[in-house]
Amino acid sequence: MAPDRHAEDDCRALLLRMARGIEGDLSPAERRALAKHLAGCRRCGEFSKSLQRTIALCREAGAPAMSARARARARAAARGVIKVRGKR
């Protein structure tokens, strides 16, 4: 693939693949395809590097402790989403 000479749909699909990759949900073949695209697409490569830096900074900063009330609200919201999706 020539740099920056492909369909933008490839880049959109890559964003979904990157998200799955962050979660560790890519097969070896998908990881290779992702690496190939990033090597051949300047915009996506730059985005990937920026995303990796952002994730590293977030990890370094650590997560603030959640209050018991905030945890309860988050759990209730998650249960609501799961319940709605289960009805589809």
Image (tube, rainbow, N blue to C red):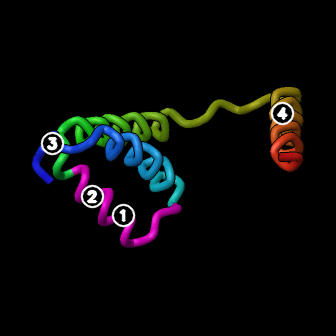
Question: What range is drawn magenta here?
Answer: 25-38
Q: Which label's residue is closer to the chain start, 2 or 4?
A: 2
Give how far apart the Cα atoms at labels 1 and 2 are.
Answer: 6 Å
The kind of residue tagged 4 is Ala
Horizontal and vertical percent position of residue 22 = 47, 52
Q: In the figure, is residue 6 to the left or right of 64?
A: left
Q: Do the residues labelled 1 and 2 touch (CB within 8 Å)?
A: yes
CB-based contact (under 8 Å), mark 1 and mark 4: no
Query: If you read the primary sequence from the N terminus, does the residue marked by circle 2 or circle 3 appear first?
Result: 3
Q: Earlier in the sequence, mark 1 or mark 4?
A: 1
Judge from the rendering whether residue 84 lies leftward or rightward of residue 13; answer left or right: right
- Label 2 environment density (alpha carbons within 10 Å; few <14, some 14–19, many ≥20): few
Q: Nearer the viewer, residue 68 or 28?
A: 28
Give the labeled residue for mark 4: 77
Q: What element carries label 2?
A: helix
Q: Residue at x 26, y 42 (%)?
A: 7
Helix, strand or loop status at disc 4:
helix
The percent position of residue 14, horizontal first and vertical second, equals: 37, 47
What amino acid is at disc 2? Ala
The disc at residue 5 is: 3
Residue at the image position 30 percent from the left and 36 percent from the top: 47
Q: Which residue is drawn at 31% across and 35% down?
A: 50
- Which one is in front, 60 or 13? 13
